[in-house]
């Protein structure tokens, strides 16, 4: 059973690491698109209608798809001062309770995002801008990112439990 759990944990961490690096490329692409927009508006006086919205969508993708990558190193906001004030055992419980509450929240957001994605896909919802792109890609990456974050939290909770179980056996 531990081998299967190890495969799951390493697999989800690998997927989230790749997603994190791809998010970085999305931010670089967003930067290039915005520089292009500024340049063609200033020097060529071209009207643009897609650059800002595409940049927003790329930033949505980057934000949600990098969340699990950030969770791998526990890079989200935390109260580090409590680490030094509380005992090791109390900190383990604090992390466990925090992880379970965070998992519940992220799972709920993932579930709602999948519902938004389905609705946008089924109804063909589009942005009400001049460009008018479909909205389902943004909702898809929100849902996928929150799902990956939830899976990463499950992996961390399980890893923490197995690590603690091994320490208790020794």
Image (cartoon, rainbow, N blue to C red):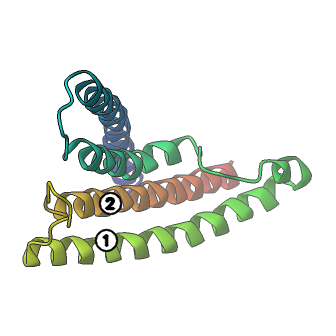
Q: Name the residue under label 1.
A: 113
Image spot of residue 39 (x, y percent): 28, 24
Q: Residue furthest front?
A: 45
Image spot of residue 113 (x, y percent): 31, 71
Q: Which residue lies furthest to the top in this view?
A: 43
> Relative to 130, is 162 on the left or the right?
right
- Towards the viewer: 13 or 23: 23
Q: Is there a contact, CB below 8 Å, between mark 2 and mark 1? A: yes
Total tally of numbered discs in the picture:
2
Q: What element carries label 2?
A: helix
Vertical placement of residue 43 versus 161, above or below:
above
Q: Which residue is drawn at 30% across and 36% down?
A: 26
Q: Residue furthest right?
A: 85
Give the alpha-carbon distance from disc 2 to disc 1, as whole Å.
Answer: 6 Å
Q: Quadrant of the N terminus?
A: bottom left
Q: Which residue is drawn at 11% across and 71% down?
A: 121
Q: Which residue is drawn at 32% across and 60% down?
A: 142
Q: What element carries label 1?
A: helix
Q: Residue at x 22, y 26 (%)?
A: 40
Image spot of residue 91 (x, y percent): 77, 57
Who comes first in sequence, dot 2 or dot 1? 1
Vertical placement of residue 123 versus 30, above or below:
below
Q: Mark 2 points at which residue?
A: 142
């Amino acid at each position: 059973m531990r081998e299967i759990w190890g495969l799951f944990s390493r697999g989800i961490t690998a997927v989230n690491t790749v997603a994190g690096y791809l998010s970085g490329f999305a931010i670089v692409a967003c930067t290039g698109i915005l520089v292009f927009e500024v340049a063609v508006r200033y020097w060529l006086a071209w009207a643009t209608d897609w650059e800002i919205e595409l940049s927003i969508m790329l930033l949505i993708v980057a934000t949600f798809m990098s969340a699990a990558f950030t969770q791998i190193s526990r890079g989200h906001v935390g109260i580090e001062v409590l680490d030094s004030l509380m005992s090791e055992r109390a900190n383990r419980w604090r992390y466990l309770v925090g992880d379970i509450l965070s998992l519940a929240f992220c799972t709920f957001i993932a579930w709602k995002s999948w519902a938004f994605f389905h609705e946008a896909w089924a109804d063909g919802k589009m942005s009400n801008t001049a460009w008018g792109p479909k909205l389902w890609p943004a909702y898809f990456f929100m849902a996928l990112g929150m799902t990956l974050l939830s899976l990463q939290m499950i992996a961390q909770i399980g890893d923490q439990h197995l690590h603690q179980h091994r320490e208790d056996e020794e």
